[in-house]
Image (cartoon, grey):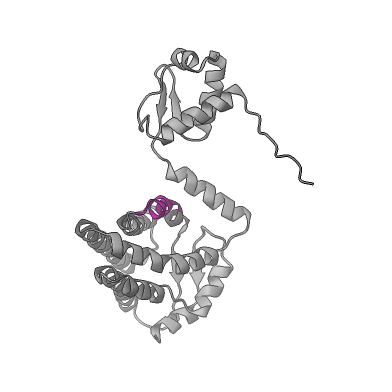
Amino acid sequence: MKSPPQIKRQTLAEQMADSLQEAILNGEWAPGDGLPTEPELAAQFGVSRAVVRDATRMLVAQGLVRAEHGRGVFVTEPDNDAFADALLLALRRVDARVWDLERFQQIMFPELLAAAVQAMTAADLDQIREQIAAYLAHYAALMRRLAVDGTEATPAENAQLLNAFRQLMTAIFQATHNKVFMLLARPLLNLANFRDWQRADQIELATAVEDTIARETAYFQRLLRALESGDPQVARAIGQTLLILPPEAVQAMQTTPIGERVTIPPEAWQDLQSE
């Protein structure tokens, strides 16, 4: 015999918070709009001002509103950063590795490119071209500077380069015009970090730098060809080849906690050179 379903009992504050949440999600109040005053809400819902304050605290905890002392309560902009932080924390707690993210991307990325090809406008494609050019210019300038100075990139330089990469990838996510892809862009991209490809071949530093720049440029030229093809199947096929990795790189990713910088051994670079 089945037990009867349990009925969730809600407090007045919870009921009020649910009603206000639904109104915000339905667009009755846009980001930046102020909610009615505390007395107005109390009168509208027939509750005490203490209940209004409790309901407001629930909405603040959900990230839907912010309370400004002396001014009122205002609807917030969607905050994907909080989602991204929570996702990284959850993945770290279950001991996720860089490979978990990479494998997910191997599945998702080809479909992302196919969706972008189907939905993008000419303006979207122009934006992606500009972002790729900006990233590659930034990448080449930094690599050449490091070769001349013989130093490592500063944290600020790494952050700037990573931001340029995220901007161009965000442009691709946005080009799908798919709400789920667009929402997931920042959380997924914030999980990514640099990869240190070690090299064992004995060549001059300047030559190694130019070789690295050429390989990075070729990668993004292939990515751009996928998007310019206008064919989802072509874009999907190119996307699959872009994420193929040598076994040594996979092994390094499997032992590196997600969110951290992975060091890939020289053997993986040699495998890339032999492709």
Quadrant assignment, res 7 = top right
Horizontal arrangement in the rendering, residue 176 relative to residue 64 (left or right): left
Horizontal arrangement in the rendering, residue 27 relative to residue 125 (left or right): right
* Residue 179 image position (x, y, % from top left): 38, 51
Quadrant assignment, res 25 = top left
Residue situated furthest right in the rendering: 1
* Residue 200 image position (x, y, % from top left): 45, 81
- The correct choice, above or below, for 63 with respect to 262 in the image is above
Quadrant assignment, res 255 = bottom right
Asked if one can make out residue 209 in the rendered structure from this viewpoint, the answer is no
In this view, the residue in front, 116 or 10, is 10
Q: Quadrant of the C terminus?
A: bottom left
Residue situated furthest bottom in the rendering: 274
Residue situated furthest front in the rendering: 1
Instruction: Please name the residue shown 47% across and 28% down the image.
Output: 20
Asked if one can make out residue 196 in the rendered structure from this viewpoint, the answer is yes
- Magenta highlight on residue 4: no
* Residue 5 image position (x, y, % from top left): 70, 39
Instruction: Please name the residue shown 28% across and 71% down the image.
Output: 231
In this view, the residue in front, 197 or 133, is 133
* Residue 81 image position (x, y, % from top left): 44, 45
Instruction: Tell how many labels.
Output: 0
Instruction: Please name the residue shown 50% across and 74% down the image.
Output: 249
- The correct choice, above or below, for 269 with respect to 118 in the image is below
In this view, the residue in front, 230 or 58, is 230
Q: Which residues are magenta?
A: 178-187
- The correct choice, above or below, for 174 with respect to 262 in the image is above
- The correct choice, above or below, for 212 with respect to 108 in the image is below
| Dominant secondary structure (helix, strand or loop) of the stretch shown in magenta | helix
